[in-house]
Amino acid sequence: MHKLIIFFTFIFIFVSCATAPKVRQEDLDAWTGVSIEALDTHSLFNTVPMKEVKTKDGFTYRYYNNSESFLKCITNSSSSLNPANQINSSANLNKNSNTTCYEKKVGCNNVFLIKDETVVSYEPKGQCYTDERVQPEGRYRKVKTKKND
């Protein structure tokens, strides 16, 4: 059962990557000029690990790492029977097995550049997609207006 779940997880990831939605510029632009309070209270970014790096020139980088690790192990085994004594076959069974495991990390590192408590830019890196769910929420959402031509 466990192998079946892992198999379907990899199939899902493979199909998702092949048809993955794209990063939308409008979702990135929605963060420009927004208070970092919006990041601190955002329903997605509030739930993923965050690392903050401050630079000497007053900028702060926030890295929100939204990823999962998957472990896959493959076991190759072979056995052979020693024909000299076929009566006690379990004693004469030579077993060879080799297990190889590897870890795959799938996800997105959401990078926010901040200056004076305000978001300057947002850039997702890795296997990312964006939609309206990553935009600022509630009172931080920018009102869209149509420009007259």
Image (cartoon, helix red, strand yellow):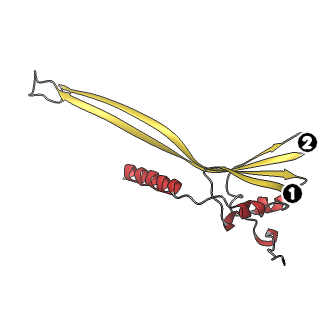
- Is 60 positioned to the left or the right of 67 in the image? right
Residue 100 is situated, as x and y percent measured from the top left of the image, at 42, 34
Q: Residues within 10 Å of mark 2 (few under 14, many from 20)?
A: few
Residue 138 is situated, as x and y percent measured from the top left of the image, at 77, 72
* Front in this rendered view, residue 31 or 84: 31
Q: For residue 57, which numbered disc appears in the image?
A: 2
- Is 79 positioned to the left or the right of 31 in the image? left
- Is 20 positioned to the left or the right of 141 in the image? left
Q: For residue 118, which numbered disc appears in the image?
A: 1
Q: Residue at the spot x=14%, y=29% of the render?
A: 89
The residue most toward the left is 87
Q: Which quarter shows the C terminus?
A: bottom right
* Front in this rendered view, residue 97 or 30: 30
Q: Secondary structure at mark 1?
A: strand
Q: Are marks 1 and 2 in contact (CB under 8 Å)?
A: no
Q: Amino acid at mark 1?
A: Thr
Q: Quadrant of residue 30?
A: bottom right
Q: Amino acid at mark 2?
A: Asp
Q: Quadrant of residue 34?
A: bottom right
Is the residue 149 above or below the residue 116 in the image? Answer: below
Q: Residue at the spot x=18%, y=30% of the render?
A: 90
Residue 7 is situated, as x and y percent measured from the top left of the image, at 40, 51
Q: Residues within 10 Å of mark 1 (few under 14, many from 20)?
A: many
Q: Residue at the spot x=48%, y=52% of the render?
A: 14
Q: Secondary structure at mark 2?
A: loop
Sequence-wise, the earlier of marks 1 and 2 is 2
- Distance, label 1 to label 2, CA atoms, is 15 Å
